[in-house]
Amino acid sequence: MKRGICLLLATLLSTPASAAVSREAFAQPLPGLDDAQQLERFFHGRSLFRQAWVVAPSRDEAVDGLGPLYNRISCIACHPKNGRGQAPASEQQPLRTMLVRLSLPGHDAHGGPLAHPVYGDQLSESAVPGVAAEGRAQVRWQEQWVTLTDGERIGLRSPRLSFSELAYGPLGNVRTSMRVGSPVFGLGLLEAIEASTLQALADAPKPDGVKGRVNQVWSVERQRLEPGRFGLKANQPDLRQQIAGAMHGDLGITSPLYPQQNCTPLQTACRQAASGGEPELDAVQLGDLHFYLAHLAPPPRRDRSKPEVQRGEQLFNQAGCAQCHRPRLSTGQHPLYPLLPAQQIEPYSDLLLHDMGPGLADGRDDYLASGREWRTPPLWGLGLLERINPGAGYLHDGRARTLEEAVLWHGGEAAVARERFAGYSRQERQELLEFLRTL
């Protein structure tokens, strides 16, 4: 029976080479995942990631417990095709694959953001029957223009956030940060990069005013501060906590890491709502979700031998982009999964915090990360985003509609690299962008 299951699942995963550039390119498992038990875990984790959770009580107790407050009903809803979410195009459009973080000035007991006493650490725009959703967020865009050295003018849009229908009173002196869903492939490989490697990258001397540092964040399971590597500000220490935190904040699903409902003390109806179990996502389910996301493969690079791509890569390096977007890293040991250690990977990231200047600042601290600092996002898979998530945009809040806009928003430690890019000829800029599209 096991052999039959193995053959069946292996057949399902044996996709042609075209899958690497298809709309399923972000859904492929790491090479070597061929054991029957591993494949079953992979598919079970995938089903949980795609699962539409329902309100408790339900006939299917394995997938009930949505809310009481939530943003979407499934993980895949914010990470379509395992890729990027999208910012709304206008004030009239809802935040379907985007959320708004909330906090007050100051820090919690572990040095993290200080949650709003009434609304928590993110705005929940949906709720189960009998519970009031927290409110609505609207995004309005403002356009500014920059002129490059050769005279080309590029429009850059920036978001303006407002709130309406606030059900629990005014927000007051709140800090906000808009975030679109990030790609979820390659996370296990990033988890296997050792903390010593991250610290060595931070300590290495860098030109052009580039620095970079490791965030130190609270581990819920181990009750201590550890290096951060996941999240847009590197505010999660490991993939398991990243998953459990998203399930809790985005879907209102409790887990062994976050066993309490996502209700603040003043949200009475929320606290009295029915539960889908204690916890609603049990340890086995959380483990299978972790297994699935840890074994999603980053798509391979393409068209390396094209002359214009090779020239673009040289220009990328000459501009100084590779100081933060490190092309190659090595994985170390992983405590759970034997496929992940001792691999040479090409994430184009150092996973460090960098000051990106006032233009991209959200003004919201997150452990050691200041309101101007962001983790260097991995660039692998960048060239397939337009195909898999059309119109998704780039940067933490989806403001950049093109790769060129994304580069031109760079400031702070990336200001010198940005100016070099702006000073390239139009052909040189296009070659650099063509290189990015092969990642």
Image (cartoon, rainbow, N blue to C red):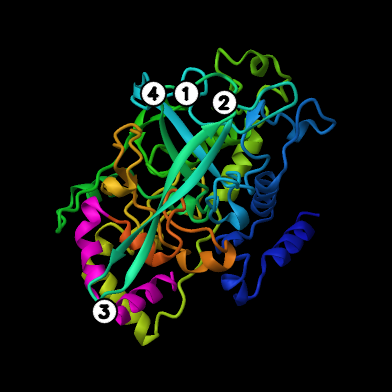
Per the model, the C-alpha gap separating discs 1 and 2 is 8 Å
Counting residues from the start of the chain, the first of labels 4 and 2 encountered is 2
- Is 184 displayed left or right of 358 in the figure? right
Q: Name the secondary structure under disc 1.
A: loop
Counting residues from the start of the chain, the first of labels 3 and 1 encountered is 1
Residue under label 1, please give it: 171
Q: Position of residue 208 (x, y in %)?
A: 15, 58
Q: Position of residue 360 (x, y in %)?
A: 33, 48
Residue under label 2, please give it: 166
- Is 191 displayed left or right of 148 in the figure? right
Residue under label 3, please give it: 425
Amino acid at dot 3? Ser
Per the model, the C-alpha gap separating discs 3 and 1 is 47 Å
Amino acid at dot 4? Asn
Amino acid at dot 2? Leu
Disc 1, disc 2: CB below 8 Å? Answer: yes
Q: Does the magenta segment cover residue 438? A: yes
Counting residues from the start of the chain, the first of labels 3 and 4 encountered is 4
Q: Position of residue 410 (x, y in %)?
A: 29, 56
**Which region is colored magenta?**
411-439
- Graded by Cα atoms within 10 Å as few (under 14), some (14 to 19) or many (20 or more), the crowding at tag 4 reads few
Question: What is the tally of numbered marks visible in this picture?
Answer: 4
Per the model, the C-alpha gap separating discs 3 and 2 is 49 Å
Front-most of residues 347 and 288? 347
Residue at point 78% right, 30% down?
61
Q: Name the secondary structure under disc 3.
A: loop
Label number found at residue 173:
4
Q: Name the secondary structure under disc 2.
A: loop
* Foreground: disc 3 or disc 4: 4
